[in-house]
Image (cartoon, rainbow, N blue to C red):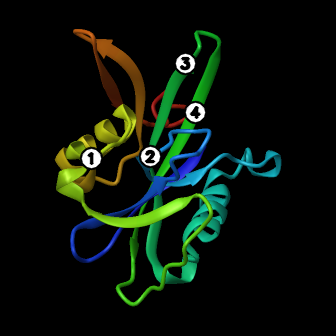
Amino acid sequence: MAVAFLFNDKQEVLLLQKRSGSSFLPGYLVPIGGHMEAREINDPRQACLREVEEETGLTEQVMDSLDLRYIIHRIKDDKEIRVQYIYTGNVRADSTLIESEEGRLLWVNRSTIADRHVTASTQEVMRHYLETGIHHNHVYVGSMHSFHGEPAMGWNVLEDWEGNNL
């Protein structure tokens, strides 16, 4: 998957509230994005841009940035490893949104995400971004795990040690 947390100048993040009849996360607020097409497997940024345009009408031209900030790993049904590429970007104030068949677009104050109907991974990404990620340009790798019976995320900075420090 490739998704984006898109921010405006009012400290808000654009989220999509999935339709109640959706087969995936009905009623949840989710970041903009979705599954990658086969031709996009080696280019998750392109997949993210495509999904953003499909779901919001926003193009790269109205974004001040769209940077890879997080890669999350999790296992589904104890057999399928899922990888999610998460980008952050800033949307110009004069940008126009379109509604999509996926659900309803909402600007949500980024500090109130934990109070909303969001997934554990969305909560953890926003918590980490607001506490740490917003202050750095690192790409963080996270893996979901259980901590005292509650979902949690372990974070590491992604670094290239091949050739540089050997």
From what the image shows, is residue 90 above or below residue 34? below
- The answer to whether the residue labelled 4 contacts the one labelled 2, judged by CB atoms less than 8 Å apart, is no
| Closer to the eye: label 4 or 2 | 2
C-alpha gap between disc 3 and disc 4? 9 Å
Residue under numbered circle 1 = 116
| Mark nearer the N terminus (1 vs 2) | 2
Note whether 16 is above or below 107 in the view shown. above
78 horizontally vs 7: left or right: right
- The percent position of residue 139, horizontal first and vertical second, equals 41, 45
Residues at circles 3 and 2 in contact by the CB criterion of under 8 Å: no
Residue marked by disc 2: 27
Badge 1 crowding class, 10 Å Cα cut-off, few under 14, some 14 to 19, many 20 or more, is few
Residue 72 picture location, percent across and down: 47, 33
Label 3 SS: strand
Q: Earlier in the sequence, mark 1 or mark 3?
A: 3
Give x and y (percent) for residue 149: 27, 10
Number of the label disc, if any, that sits on residue 75 = 3
Residue drawn at x 55%, y 18% is 75
Between the C-alphas of marks 1 and 3, the distance is 24 Å
Local packing at callout 3 (Cα closer than 10 Å; few below 14, some 14-19, many 20+) is few
Provide the residue designation for mark 4.
Answer: 83
